[in-house]
Image (tube, rainbow, N blue to C red):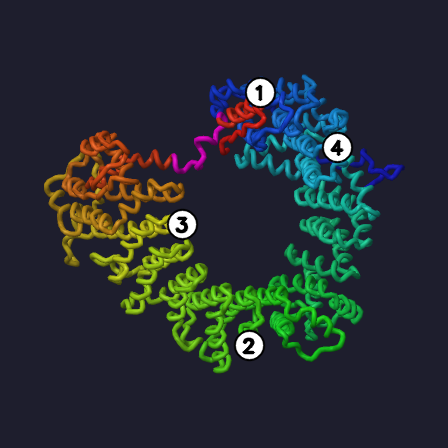
């Protein structure tokens, strides 16, 4: 970029670069979009309270009891300004703002809120003009005003100042205000603020200015015009284009100031780390969203400044530098050659630690650049090459690099840090093209060698690396990273070639008494992944199989519950991966899992139940006969559901039956009476629905409702199949049209003919089928479970129950106007209601609607609100009287929707301030918002 005689960035050059892509188009008038009646969400009570709230906040000199009230109020205002001007509804706001910014004794949080609110209002051009005419903007965003009052020292005020500007800068007038008041200089100074939040906010605002107001190139303009002609663009996009084209003079001034700042400050200097770090973050933010010509300007300006930082080799700036370079290198551009040169320089640095992190950054960005990618891979493999003594790199790394790395690995902390970074990226390495310096098989062997060394089985090594070996022996961090890398490599090309060596190393860890619990867990996960690639378990050597059996039987009885838990999980995972336990472990794992049901740790019990479900899944899917062993398991599980004091096992029990119910063969015919091909499942489901719906754990109740949903789907599907089955079963007979008519096909009020009634009453269809389905659902306990869930205190449970009850009503309950035999038969299906709890609530609903006079009398006569005895009521009558749609509307709202309202918030603020003025000792509890 051309510079002025004094070395500064030439504003004329900037103006020329920016101006070449602009075109003058008249800006739309925001005022034309304003219309009356926008703020239906602000009711009259809020409008009445707002002046009083503004008055008390303006006089507030101490924080509110609820320090989030102001943020909540601002959130509400933000929602109101999306469609129009807030000042139309709240004309008191400018008076409030003017009062606060002149009050130097106001609470800093109120000042911060006021500055944010000012920017929010000024985001509209109409409101901006009004606030500017009243000198509110010039005083509110005058830094000197706040410094003179001593309030600028509070980070809260500085944050409000920045965020207010951020909200305001949505149109050219705001950008002109920023330039004319020279606020860019203040923002650049705030980049290095002592508060990290303030510095970050300043950076975000500077990036917003450069990106939001950047001029649009002629290519982009032509593309938008084409889309406009074709009707493929929106008014917002056109408006945004217009705004970007009109801001050239002011934008040139801002860009000049920021570029000059970056040019002079992005240089290595003492105590300049924080400043450089913030500038690099700013560059990364802008590069990620910059378009031509802004991108070209940055590429002309940046390299010289960045090269000085690259050459200086500041370790603290390695990652931020790589972030800028890789972001700048992401889009093709003629000037990217300079950026590419800087990337190469970063990958040639003499500091091995910086080198490792720079190489990792290249792989994570997934750039399709063979030169830099190969160089990054060689860097990341070098520590493994040196430590293990294997020849991973071809050609070999220069001797000076190997010597430097070997020297670095002597330091334990550095050694572990470098190796963990390398191991974390091995999966990325193996996904690279085949011309990389080391194939996946070699990488796998290096990781195995490292795991052997860490496990205490170090191979013969040179003197130069023996010290580094000691750093990794017994290091759990290295072991976990190595096992994770090994897991990722299980799907790499050529994995099967080293499968037995991998399994041997894993056995060593499983057998090692010193292995950490988390390491063993990773080991099990890796073992499952590698067993999946095993072509034939029977080809495993007897010794390896015996070692695995011994290790598993030992670990399932480990004194550490974490080890027992991961061992039980491993047994279930094997079954889930279709690995036959008998072939691998020599015997069935079911007895071990049944024994684990009595473990003293609830997590282990829950894992054992899940593992049993995975183990039984195949027999369920095949519809196998229930064995005595499975009967015993079900008995134990039902005992756990009713007696276990911990929630995890009880949840697992319900999920076990969900898995069982879901595992029925998809093509199997629905049985006439049972839920599944097993007579054991039917009574079990009844018990689960009864106990699970009354559980104290809301997740148990939620899982129970999921089981109820499956049951409901099963029976309604059965009814649909029956209702469309032709009554004439001869293969050449013509099916009756009525046989295919769904139960609710007739319009409300229209009755069936005698022939239709007769057809509907035939076995397997019509009234007998529909009433039979509903009666069966009552007998299975599904209706009771859903009704109890509807009145549950946990909203997710009540919501799910309500959804299922609506489904049930729409499926089995004919309209009230339906006078057919089907409707009459369904109306006779009843359920029992107790005189307490949810039963009492339903009986009240029935009584209030006059559906059940006897119940209404009981309600009136009950002195304590309880009704004794059991009442049988029509299921469909209950489903109609509950107002399920209204309940659904309430349940889908947040649990605090009654208190969570703008009116409640305004009342809280007034109550808190009024109480504080009368008593300093009275605590005020405000609503949850």
Judged from the image, the secondary structure of the residue bearing numbered disc 3 is: helix
Left or right: 663, with 182 as reference point: left
Q: For the magenta stretch, what is the residue range? A: 890-903
Toward the viewer: 279 or 614? Answer: 614
Judged from the image, the secondary structure of the residue bearing numbered disc 1 is: helix
Residue 797 visible? The answer is: yes
Q: Distance between the residues labelled 4 and 2?
A: 64 Å
Q: Which of marks 4 and 2 is nearer the N terminus?
A: 4
Q: Nearer the viewer, mark 3 or mark 2?
A: 3
| Tag of residue 910 | none
Toward the viewer: 247 or 679? Answer: 679
Q: Earlier in the sequence, mark 2 or mark 1?
A: 1
The reply to whether the magenta stretch includes residue 891 is yes
Residue at label 1? 87
**Residue 7: x percent and y percent?**
87, 39
Q: Which of marks 4 and 1 is nearer the N terminus?
A: 1
Left or right: 661, with 311 as reference point: left
Residue at label 4? 184
């Amino acid at each position: 970029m051309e510079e002025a005689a004094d070395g500064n960035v030439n504003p004329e050059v900037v103006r020329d670069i920016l101006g070449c892509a602009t075109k003058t188009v008249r800006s739309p008038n925001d005022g034309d979009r304003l219309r009356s009646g926008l703020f239906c969400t602000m009711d009259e009570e809020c409008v009445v309270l707002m002046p009083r709230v503004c008055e008390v906040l303006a006089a507030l000199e101490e924080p509110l009891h609820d320090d989030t009230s102001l943020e909540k109020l601002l959130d509400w205002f933000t929602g109101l300004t999306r469609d129009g001007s807030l000042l139309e509804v709240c004309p008191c706001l400018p008076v409030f703002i003017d009062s606060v910014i002149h009050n130097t004794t106001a609470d800093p949080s109120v000042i911060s809120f006021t500055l944010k609110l000012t920017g929010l209002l000024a985001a509209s051009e109409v409101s901006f003009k009004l606030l500017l005419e009243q000198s509110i903007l010039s005083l509110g965003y005058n830094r000197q005003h706040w410094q003179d009052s001593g309030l600028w020292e509070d980070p809260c005020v500085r944050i409000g100042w920045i965020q207010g500007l951020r909200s305001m800068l949505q149109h050219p007038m705001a950008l002109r205000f920023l330039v004319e008041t020279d606020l860019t200089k203040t923002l650049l100074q705030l980049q290095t603020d002592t508060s990290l939040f303030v510095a970050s906010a300043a950076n975000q605002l500077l990036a917003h200015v450069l990106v939001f107001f950047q001029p649009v190139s002629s290519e982009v303009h032509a593309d938008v015009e084409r889309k406009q002609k074709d009707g493929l663009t929106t008014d917002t996009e056109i408006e945004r284009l217009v705004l970007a084209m009109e801001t050239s003079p002011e934008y040139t001034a801002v860009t000049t100031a920021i570029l000059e700042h970056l040019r002079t400050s992005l240089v290595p200097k003492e105590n300049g780390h924080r400043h450089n770090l913030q500038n690099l973050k700013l560059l990364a933010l802008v590069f990620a969203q910059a378009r031509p010509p802004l991108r070209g300007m940055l590429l002309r300006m940046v390299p010289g400044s960045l090269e000085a930082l690259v050459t200086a080799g500041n370790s603290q700036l390695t990652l931020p530098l790589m972030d800028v370079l890789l972001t700048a290198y992401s889009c093709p551009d003629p000037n990217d050659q300079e950026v590419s040169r800087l990337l190469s320089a970063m990958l040639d640095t003499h500091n091995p630690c910086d080198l490792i992190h720079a190489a990792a950054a290249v792989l994570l960005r997934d750039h399709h650049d063979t030169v830099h990618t190969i160089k990054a891979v060689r860097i990341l493999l070098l520590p493994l090459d040196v430590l293990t003594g294997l020849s991973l790199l071809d050609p070999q790394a220069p001797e000076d690099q190997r010597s430097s790395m070997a020297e670095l690995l002597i330091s334990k902390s550095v050694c572990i840090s470098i190796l963990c970074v390398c191991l974390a990226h091995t999966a990325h390495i193996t996904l690279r093209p085949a011309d990389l310096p080391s194939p996946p098989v070699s990488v796998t062997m290096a990781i195995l060698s490292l795991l052997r060394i860490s496990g205490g089985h170090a191979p013969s090594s040179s003197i130069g690396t023996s010290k580094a070996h000691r750093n990794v022996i017994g290091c759990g961090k290295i072991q976990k990273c190595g096992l994770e890398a090994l897991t990722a490599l299980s799907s790499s090309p050529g994995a099967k070639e080293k499968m037995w060596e991998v399994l041997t190393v894993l056995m060593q860890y499983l057998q090692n008494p010193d292995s950490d619990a988390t390491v063993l867990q990773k080991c099990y996960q890796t073992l499952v992944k590698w067993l999946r690639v095993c072509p034939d378990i029977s080809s495993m050597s007897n010794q390896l199989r015996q070692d695995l059996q011994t290790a598993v039987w030992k670990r399932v009885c480990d004194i550490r519950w974490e080890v027992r838990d991961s061992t039980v999980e491993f047994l279930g995972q094997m079954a889930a991966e279709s690995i036959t336990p008998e072939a691998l472990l020599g015997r069935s794992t079911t007895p071990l899992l049944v024994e684990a049901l009595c473990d003293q740790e609830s997590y282990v019990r829950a894992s054992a139940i899940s593992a049993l479900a995975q183990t039984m899944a195949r027999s369920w899917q095949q519809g196998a006969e229930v064995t005595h062993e499975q009967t015993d398991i079900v008995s134990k599980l039902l005992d756990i559901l009713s007696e276990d004091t911990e929630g995890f096992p009880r949840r697992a029990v319900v999920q076990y039956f969900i898995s069982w119910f879901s595992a029925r063969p998809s093509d199997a015919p629905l049985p006439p009476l049972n839920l599944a091909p097993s007579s054991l499942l039917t009574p079990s489901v009844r018990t689960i629905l009864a106990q699970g719906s009354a559980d104290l754990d809301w997740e148990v109740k939620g899982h129970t409702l999921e089981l109820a949903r499956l049951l409901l789907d099963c029976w309604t599907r059965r009814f649909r199949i029956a209702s469309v089955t032709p009554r004439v079963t001869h293969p050449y007979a013509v099916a009756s049209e009525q046989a295919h008519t769904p139960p609710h096909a007739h319009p409300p009020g229209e009755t069936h003919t005698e022939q239709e009634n007769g057809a509907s009453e035939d076995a397997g269809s019509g009234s007998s089928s529909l009433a039979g389905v509903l009666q069966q659902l009552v007998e299975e306990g599904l209706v009771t479970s859903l009704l109890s869930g509807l009145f549950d205190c946990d909203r997710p449970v009540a919501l799910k129950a309500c959804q299922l009850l609506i489904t049930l009503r729409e499926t089995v309950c004919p309209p009230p106007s339906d006078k057919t035999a089907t409707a009459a038969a369904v109306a006779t299906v009843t359920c029992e209601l107790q005189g307490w709890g949810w039963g009492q609530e339903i009986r009240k609903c029935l009584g209030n609607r006059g559906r059940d006079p006897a119940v209404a009398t009981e309600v009136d006569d009950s002195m304590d609100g309880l009704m004794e005895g059991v009442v049988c009521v029509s299921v469909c009558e209950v489903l109609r009287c509950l107002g399920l749609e209204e309940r659904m509307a309430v349940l889908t709202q947040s649990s605090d929707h009654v208190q969570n309202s703008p009116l409640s918030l305004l009342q809280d603020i007034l109550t808190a301030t009024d109480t504080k003025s009368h008593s300093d000792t009275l605590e005020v509890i405000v609503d949850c918002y």
